[in-house]
Image: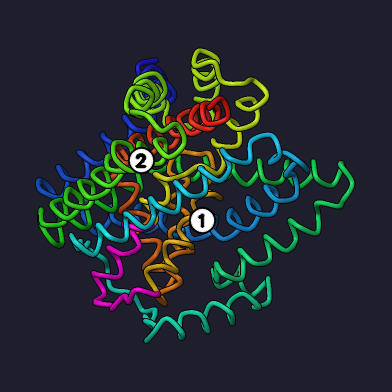
Amino acid sequence: MTSSKRHGGLIGWITSTSLVGQIVVGLIAGVVIAVVAPEFASTLSFLGDIFINALKAVAPILVFVLVMAAIANHRQGSKSHMGRVFVLYVIGTFLAAILAVTASFLFPITIQLQPTASEVNPPGSVLEVLFTVVLNIIDNPVHALLNANYMGVLAWGIGLGIALRHARDNTKHLVADFSLAVTSLVQLVIRFAPLGIMGIVTGVVATTGFSALMDYARLLMLLVGCMLVVALVLNPIIVWTQIRRNPYPLVWTCLKESGVTAFFTRSSAANIPVNMALAKKLNVNEDMYSVSIPLGATINMAGAAVTITVLTLAAVNTLGINVDIGSAILLSIMASVAACGASGVAGGSLLLIPLAASLFGLPNDIAMQVVGVGFVIGVVQDSVETALNSSTDVLFTAAASMHQEN
């Protein structure tokens, strides 16, 4: 009976505690074990290896299916209702990526990465990057999935998505259901993040000491700093171009009434009803916000673009790879495209980092270590990212509506 109660208590705690809370416990447990019982570090680090390998398994198929389903099920003519909002979404996401690249150049960050048997093949110039991209795009789709060639995966996802737009509705529904199934598998893998992070942190701290935690703290400060600049500087400038008056009252309203709830729910999709209510309160045309808010929860991902860019460049800096202006611009474009395909699960943007990392010849083993680092700092990063993404949905919708009124 006592044993049964203990098991019930543990299961009850797991089901009632948020993933963020469990990750915090795993993070603390990893540090404590590395300090108190370092002899167990090698054993527990195996949990981190399992978690990283599980992410490596699901990430390519996730990118392929999400992109294909999103394009195949895109409704014809939906842009016509809110073309200006769509443009603001795209511009905002791209400029956020540019800002992240600039910040990474000004404040270069390195992170602790484990040695890998895979060879790093950094490109010599932007032309070599473009040549590699073209070759990867025309890769065999099965080979692309098996070898985590994200360029090929993305290209085939886009191509099949476009072709399936003319398919029967039943086929489109099947593709959408398959997308939901893959997302469910990703959610299952992410549920084991606390154990994986405990293993990662235990191994890293036992090997390198607390210097790795300082790297995590600096990386987190750079990420959050970029997102705050986007929210408080870049977004107000974009809004001003639309309404031609002080944008901050609208910015603060959106951050307070949308950003705060999104910070705690950590889901743009879950925050859609909040944004709908706020848009109605701001007297936005219902025909506009009924389309733009759900669409924004899918493609308006400035925070995700920042995350993908900063973490990719942190890995690049760690490996001593030189990044020229052309490659930086390509990275900004790729991060913007990848961000628009980020899944709706917690940490979804992290699983698209390998797509951007492939621009610089980073093998999948290293890219997935970077994803693991992202989950370690995701306790704060993902909440801030979601708050930025979701509040910007209603901000840009309201700005476009006010522009029409003017």
Question: Hey, what amino acid is under mark 1?
Answer: Ala
Dot label at residue 54: none
* Residue 220 appears left or right of 393: left
On-image quarter of the N terminus: top left
Q: What is the secondary structure assignment of the residue under circle 2?
A: helix
Q: Residue at x 33, y 50 (%)?
A: 374
* Residue 115 appears left or right of 299: left
Residue 325 is one of the magenta-drawn residues:
yes
Residue 370 spot, x, y in % from top left:
34, 59
Residue 33 spot, x, y in % from top left:
17, 45
Residue nearest the observer in this picture, 235 or 205: 235
Question: Hey, what amino acid is under mark 2?
Answer: Ile
Q: Nearer the viewer, mark 2 or mark 1?
A: 2
Q: Is residue 116 visible?
A: yes
Q: As displayed, is residue 316 above or below residue 102?
A: below
Which quadrant would residue 284 be assigned to in this image? top right
Dot label at residue 338: 1
Give the spatial CA distance, label 2 vs label 1: 24 Å
Residue range (magenta) = 309-326
Q: What is the secondary structure assignment of the residue under circle 1?
A: helix
Q: Residue at x 68, y 76 (%)?
A: 140
Q: How many marks?
A: 2
* Residue 334 appears left or right of 22: right
The residue that disc 2 covers is: 237
Q: Main secondary structure of the magenta part?
A: helix
Residue 132 spot, x, y in % from top left:
51, 82
Kindly give the residue lying farthest to the right in the view shown. 168
Q: As displayed, is residue 177 above or below residue 261?
A: below
10 Å neighbourhood of mark 2: few (<14), some, or many (≥20)?
some
Closer to the chain start, of discs 2 and 1, is 2
Q: As displayed, is residue 152 above or below residue 260?
A: below
